[in-house]
Every structure is written in structure tokens, then in C-alpha cells.
Amino acid sequence: MRITAKIDYAVRACVELAAAWDSAPGAAPRFVKAESISHAQAAPDAFVLGILNQLKRAGLVVSRRGADGGYCLAHPPESIVVADVVRAIDGPLANVAGSYVEDVSYAGAAAPVRDVWVALRAAMRSVLDTVSLADIAGGELPPDVRRLLADETAWSTRPHGRETRVRGR
């Protein structure tokens, strides 16, 4: 999966909104100015504003005008997972040339490639559909995700002994 700058900034903006969320019963939503989010995350103001508007169209954030206005999560941060943000910005977690991975088919020896793409999507879901904005804002990731991070190979670009080799070089 390629994590674009837009997805990265969108997740970070949502985490900023999650950090501002007041979970006390009956508490009024805390609206955060787009400029505050962009400055907190060292992101271009116009870029963040565009992302927030895209998240608004997807129903993940709401906005309010005025001096006390800004942006706020549309739902409690524990009910929004990272995959929701990714899908709002970029569509499905995995697709092949615009098709859902389960809808592609290949002939001959390549037939099982579809199964690899489906498994890849399932692996991404195992993280992105389980980590909520509240988890990130609170600094406490789910146990399964922490276990993945504890594996030292998670921190290297390629697992040891699995370097890509090109013939003839």
C-alpha cells in the first residue's frame, strides 16, 4: 500500500480532531480551526482545508462557521477507524486498476494472484479497521498492532534475507 501525503495528512488531521474531542456526557463539540490543524502538523493550510472538506463530504467531520467555528469529528473518535479515513480520501483499501480485488481474475499460472490481493486487503484491514482515532490520540494501540510493532522486521524496509534480486546485476 502506498500511503500518499493526502492520506497521511488526513489521518493526522483526524487525530488532531480526536485529541480535541470531549467525551464527557453532554459535552458540546470542540471545533478546531483548519489553520490550527495545519500548523500543528506542519501542513499547508489550503491542503488541509481541502482534506477537511473531503472528510466532511464523506461524513467523518462536520464544520461550523463563525468565530467559534471550525471542524469537529462527526462521530466519537473511538467509532472512527483509520480505514474510514483512508477510504474517504482514496476509496477502497485495495483495488486492481479500479476493480475490487475479489472481482479480478487471471488465467493460467497467474490465477492465484487474485488470492494474494485479497489476502493483502485482509492484512491491511487487520490493522486499519481495528485502530481507532481514539487509540492513536490516546497513544494506546490495540494489542494485535503492538505485537506487529514488537517484531523487529516491521521496522526494516525488507526482512533480512529477502532482498530483491534482479538477474544479470
Image (tube, rainbow, N blue to C red):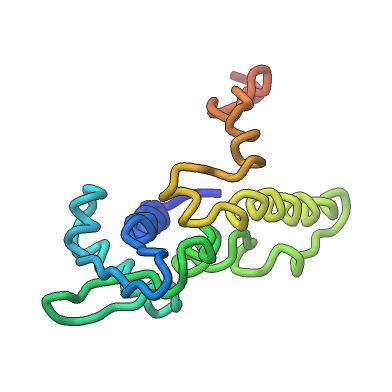
Is 166 placed left or right of 113 in the picture?
A: left
Q: Is residue 6 visible?
A: no
In screen coordinates, is 129 left or right of 85?
A: right
Instruction: Out of 16 and 26, give the one closest to the viewer.
Output: 26
Q: Is residue 131 visible?
A: yes
Can you name the residue that lies furthest to the front here?
25
User: Is 78 above or below relative to 42?
Assistant: below
Residue at figure coordinates x 36%, y 63% from the top left: 21
Whole-percent x and y of residue 40? 22, 50
Q: Is residue 53 above or below residue 37?
A: below
Q: Position of residue 84 (x, y in %)?
A: 53, 65
Could you tell me which quadrant the C terminus lies in? Answer: top right
The residue lying at 28 percent from left, 71 percent from top is 71
Vertical arrangement, residue 115 with respect to residue 33, above or below: above
Looking at this view, name the residue that lies furthest to the right. 108
Residue 58 percent coordinates (x, y): 45, 77
- Residue at 41% in and 64% down: 23
Name the foreground residue: 91 vs 113.
Answer: 91
Q: Residue at x 47, y 55 (%)?
A: 134
Residue 15, percent from left and from top: 38, 55
Q: Quadrant of residue 149?
A: top right
Q: How many numbered marks are there?
A: 0
